Amino acid sequence: MAKKCDACGVKRAVVYQRHTGRALCLDCFRRDMIERVKNEIEKWNMIEPGDRVMLALSGGKDSYFLLEAAVELIGSDKVFGLSIIEGIPGYNREDDVKKLVAIAKDLGVDVVVTSIREYIGHSLYETYIRAVRRGARHAACTYCGISRRRIMSYYARIYGANKVATGHNLDDEAQTAVVNFVRGDVLGLVKMHPLFRSVDDPEIAAPRIKLLRKIYEWETASYALLKGYPLQETECMFINMRPTLRAAVREALYKVEQERPGTLLRMMEALDHALAPLVSQLKPEKLGRCKRCGEITSPKRSLCKLCEILDEAGIERPLYAKARPLRLKTLSVPAQPVLAEGEA
Ligand SMILES: [Zn+2]
Ligand SMILES: [Zn+2]
C-alpha cells in the first residue's frame, strides 16, 4: 500500500523531505513551501501595502513556484512578470517562455517578454562573439548577467514596480554565501542580507527581494515536475563557462547536505541572524550616473558596467531599448514612463 502523507495522514505521499524527515502529499508539500515563503516575507518585511512587484521569470523550474507563491501571498493584481530571452543558439528559450506566459495568464498574471537584442540591439551570442573577436576576456555569463540586471531595472521603472522578486533559491544563496566567505568578502555577505538596501530611492532602483531564499532547489524542481509544469529541456551552451569556484562550492555543499539534511537551511538562518546587526550600520552608497546612458553607476565610475563591457565588445551605441510599454491587463502603466520613448 502506498505511504500516506505524514502531515495530513489522508493523501498519498509523493515526496520525501529529507530536512524534516517527512513524507508529504503534493498539497502539504506545497503548503509547507508557501509557509516558508510567507515567514520570510513577514520576518524581513519584504512586502508592504501598495507594493507593485515585478517577478523576474526565467521560465525555469523556480519560475513556476515563484509565480504561484507570489499570486497567493502578494496577489495577482499586484504582480506582473518579466521574461528576458538571451539569444543563445540552441537554447530554446522562446518555447519555454511561451508555456510560462500561458500558465501565468491562467493565474491572472501578465508577463512582459523581451530580449537582450531588443534592449541592446544585439543578442547575447552576437555581443559575446564581438567581444571575443576584440580580445575581451569576460565570460559570456558576465555579459548575460549584467545585461539582464539592467533590463530588469529598466522594466521595473517603466511599469512602476517598486520591488523586483527574483527566483534565487536556498541553494543559490548558500553557494553565494560560501563563495563570499572563501573570498573573504564580508561586504558581499552583508549585501546578501534581506534587509540590505543598495539604494534608498526605489524610483532609481527597485529593491530586489528573494522570496524563495529558504526553498531548496530540489523542492521547486520536484514541485514543477509533480504539477506537470514544463521543464526546460535544453541547456545553455555557456554553462561550462560558469565560475569554477562556484561549481566546486556547489558540489561540496551538495555533499554536506546529503550527509546532514537541513545544513543549507541552518547555515542561512545562522547568517541571517549574525549579519542583521551589520546591515543596519551600512549606509546606502551615493551612486553616480553613467555619462553615456544616464543610468546609475557605482561611486566614482564614469561609465556604467554595461556601457563598459559593451564598449569592449565594440558596441559604442547600444540601443538601450526605447521600447514601447506593452499594455498590461492587471496593471496600468504610469502615464509618463521615465526614459522610455514611445513608438507609434
Ligand atoms: Zn498531506
Ligand atoms: Zn551606461
Image (cartoon, grey):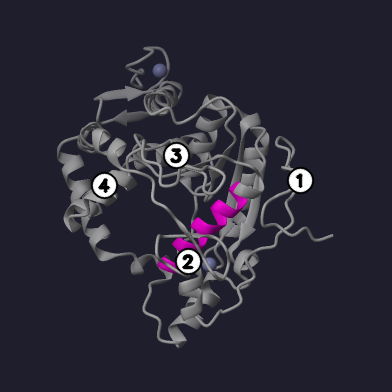
Instruction: Indicate which disc, 1 or 2, sits on the residue closer to the N terminus.
Output: 2
SS assignment at label 3 = strand
Residue occupied by mark 4: 189
Which quadrant would residue 116 be assigned to in this image?
Answer: bottom right
Which disc, if any, is residue 304?
2
Position of the C terminus by quadrant: bottom right
At label 4, the amino acid type is Leu
Residue occupied by mark 3: 209
Residue occupied by mark 1: 327
**In the image, which is nearer the foreground, mark 4 or mark 1?**
4
Residue at (48, 39) in percent of width and height:
224
SS assignment at label 1 = loop
* Label 2 CB sits under 8 Å from any ligand 2 atom: yes
Instruction: Indicate which disc, 4 or 1, sits on the residue closer to the N terminus.
Output: 4
Spatial separation of the CA atoms under disc 4 and disc 1? 39 Å
| Residue 101 point in image, percent of width and height | 64, 45
Q: What's drawn in magenta, residue-wise? A: 142-156
Q: Nearer the viewer, residue 124 or 217?
A: 124
Q: Are marks 4 and 1 in contact (CB under 8 Å)?
A: no
Task: Tell me if residue 151 comes above or below residue 177 in the rendering.
Answer: below
Instruction: Indicate which disc, 4 or 2, sits on the residue closer to the N terminus.
Output: 4
Task: Tell me if residue 291 comes above or below residue 49 in the rendering.
Answer: below
| Residue 164 point in image, percent of width and height | 51, 43
At label 2, the amino acid type is Cys
At label 3, the amino acid type is Ile
Instruction: Indicate which disc, 1 or 3, sits on the residue closer to the N terminus.
Output: 3
How crowded pointer 3 is (Cα within 10 Å; few <14, some 14-19, many 20+) is rated as many
